[in-house]
């Protein structure tokens, strides 16, 4: 069985979209894959409730309990590796990972970013797109490398920037596309395993 471990920091809406797609599309039978665990770096992350309600394994590795990134990433790797993941999926996981962590999961680590990469890596992507006068915004699924938001692009979706858009209204439209392309990209990667 190809195990997925999904990392979240908050509500986990992209995680939920992936879990629902796995259920609806019968990934276990069709792709030999399942979401084995959901892990958060925040104890109160709402997405953990969604996973628990579905009987999924969950864990918390609180980044505040560690002196530095290396110690946190080492503990996170231990929590992930218990599940022998074919893929580690970052779904709103708001931590920058160390090069050692990224190397440990080389080729198995994916993320979704709320911009049309290579434009606007990092934070505040929607406001930056508005400030630059972009006509299109969107989301990108990419492989994770040691360089922030610069890995191989696996999927993208674009939405128009509308007159009167705010960062919040644009973010909401982009998020609907994230929920479509992330499960598709994950299923594609699993089909290649």
Image (cartoon, helix red, strand yellow):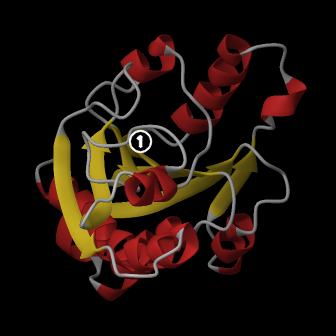
Left or right? Give the position of 145 relative to 156. Answer: right
In the rendered image, residue 176, in percent from the top left (x then y), is placed at: 40, 80
Of residues 157 and 47, the one nearer the viewer is 157
In this picture, is 2 found above or below 86? below
Can the viewer see residue 32 in this picture?
A: no
Can the viewer see residue 21 in this picture?
A: yes
Left or right? Give the position of 155 relative to 10. Answer: left
Left or right? Give the position of 167 relative to 137. Answer: right
Left or right? Give the position of 192 relative to 181. Answer: left
In this picture, is 65 found above or below 177? above
Quadrant where the N terminus lies?
bottom left
Q: Which residue is mark 1?
A: 85
What residue appears at the point 33 percent right and 59 percent down from the top-left corner? 133
What residue appears at the point 26 percent right and 53 percent down from the top-left corner? 116
Q: Quadrant of residue 56?
A: bottom right
In the rendered image, residue 177, in percent from the top left (x then y), is placed at: 32, 75
In this picture, is 47 found above or below 72? below
Q: Residue furthest right?
A: 65
What residue appears at the point 53 percent right and 73 percent down from the top-left corner? 166
In the rendered image, residue 94, in percent from the top left (x then y), is placed at: 62, 43
Q: Secondary structure at mark 1?
A: strand
Q: Residue furthest bottom?
A: 24
In this picture, is 170 found above or below 83? below
């Amino acid at each position: 069985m190809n195990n997925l471990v999904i990392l979240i920091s908050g509500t986990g809406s992209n995680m939920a979209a992936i879990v629902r797609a796995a259920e609806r599309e019968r990934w276990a039978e069709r792709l030999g894959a399942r979401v084995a665990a959901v892990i958060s770096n925040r104890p109160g992350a709402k997405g953990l409730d969604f996973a628990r309600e579905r009987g999924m394994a969950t864990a918390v590795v609180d980044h505040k309990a560690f002196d530095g990134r290396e110690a946190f990433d080492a503990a996170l790797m231990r929590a992930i590796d218990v599940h022998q993941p074919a893929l580690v999926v970052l779904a709103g996981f708001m931590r920058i990972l160390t090069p050692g962590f990224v190397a440990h999961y080389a080729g198995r680590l994916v993320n979704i970013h709320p911009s049309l990469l290579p434009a606007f890596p990092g934070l505040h992507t929607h406001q930056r797109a508005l400030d630059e006068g972009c006509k299109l915004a969107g989301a990108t699924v990419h492989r994770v490398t040691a360089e922030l938001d610069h890995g191989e692009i696996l999927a993208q979706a674009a939405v128009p920037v509308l007159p009167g858009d705010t960062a919040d209204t644009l973010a909401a439209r982009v998020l609907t596309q994230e929920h479509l392309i992330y499960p598709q990209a994950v299923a594609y990667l699993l089909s290649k395993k």
